[in-house]
Image (cartoon, grey):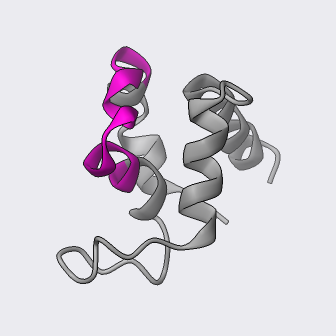
Amino acid sequence: MPFPEILKNAEKFLRNPDCLKTQAGLTEFICRDCDFYKEGEDEEIACGAFYLIGLLLEKKVVTVEDIIYAVRSDISNT
């Protein structure tokens, strides 16, 4: 699955990973590439993937760099 929004905004997230400490920042990072995401609709309702990725980032199990690297390398390997 391509992640065009993550890739388009990668430098923003890498420069300011603290933006992912907010609901809006996490939504921008995690949700914008999801087929089910509709901007402005039910943005307070989150799926399990949103909570899982948010938790992994918060606990520093993964970093913004890890996720962007994985997305970029997946694109280059296809």
Q: Quadrant of residue 42?
A: bottom left
The percent coordinates of residue 17 (x first, y second) are 41, 23
Name the dominant secondary structure of the magenta segment. helix
> Which quadrant of the figure contains the N terminus?
bottom right
- Which residue: 34% across, 52% down? 28
Q: Quadrant of residue 27?
A: bottom left
- Which residue: 36% across, 23% down? 18
**Magenta stretch encompasses residue 21:** yes
Front-most of 67 and 49? 49
Q: Is residue 64 left or right of residue 73?
A: left
- Which residue: 42% across, 48% down? 29
The percent coordinates of residue 56 (x first, y second) are 67, 39
> Which quadrant of the figure contains the C terminus?
bottom right
Q: Is residue 3 left or right of residue 12?
A: right
The percent coordinates of residue 52 (x first, y second) are 65, 54
Q: Is residue 53 left or right of residue 25?
A: right
Q: In this figure, what is the number of numbered marks? A: 0
Front-most of 74 and 28? 28
Q: Which region of the structure is painted magenta?
A: 14-28
